[in-house]
Amino acid sequence: MPFSSDLPKFVPRVDFLRYLDDYVINFKISIRYNRYVNDASFDVKRGKWRVSVNDNTSNVDEIYVADHLVVATGENCDAYIPMINGLENFEGEYLHCNKYLNGRSWYDKNVLVVGSGNSGMEIAYDLSTWGANTSMVIRS
């Protein structure tokens, strides 16, 4: 979603925040803030990822389920993938953001992006433009 053509090259903070609000509305993004990822595991029987998070503000545990899991951790050049229960048995695709090319192969599939740094946000955006059902889990 392009910036308005009447904005300056370096967008002021207030206009950037307005852009983000419009972006969320336009793409129907459901953002969950203040979550801590407790566990991510692949359920072989269901063929789905199960991510357990805790809402830091209410101390309520939540479960997210998706066909795909994107873990956006660390810097792009440092391909760190944390130990995730079930990853060794997962038969589907998972990848670090530095291996991501585009969302073409995830059209109409449920994909979970873990992390909201620059790479995570750009990947989530790209996935949604390619027609993936994109969700995000964000640390704080």
Image (tube, rainbow, N blue to C red):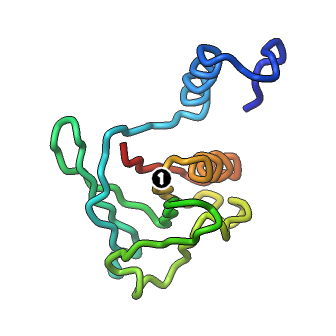
Please indicate whether residue 103 sits to the left or right of residue 86 in the image. right
- Residue that label 1 marks: 115
Please indicate whether residue 68 sits to the left or right of residue 63 in the image. right
Percent across and percent down for residue 7 are: 78, 15
Q: Amino acid at mark 1?
A: Gly
Percent across and percent down for residue 107 are: 65, 59
Percent across and percent down for residue 23 are: 61, 29
Please indicate whether residue 126 sits to the left or right of residue 111 in the image. right
Is 96 placed above or below 31 here? below
Is 7 placed above or below 77 here? above
Percent across and percent down for residue 103 are: 68, 59
Asked whether 49 or 75 is in front, the reply is 75
User: Residue at image x 28%, y 66%?
Assistant: 39
| SS category of the residue bearing label 1 | loop
Is 32 placed above or below 98 here? above
User: Residue at image x 48%, y 84%?
Assistant: 91
Task: Report crowding for label 1: few under 14, some 14 to 19, many 20 or more residues within 10 A (C-alpha).
Answer: many
Asked whether 77 or 39 is in front, the reply is 77
User: Residue at image x 51%, y 37%?
Assistant: 29
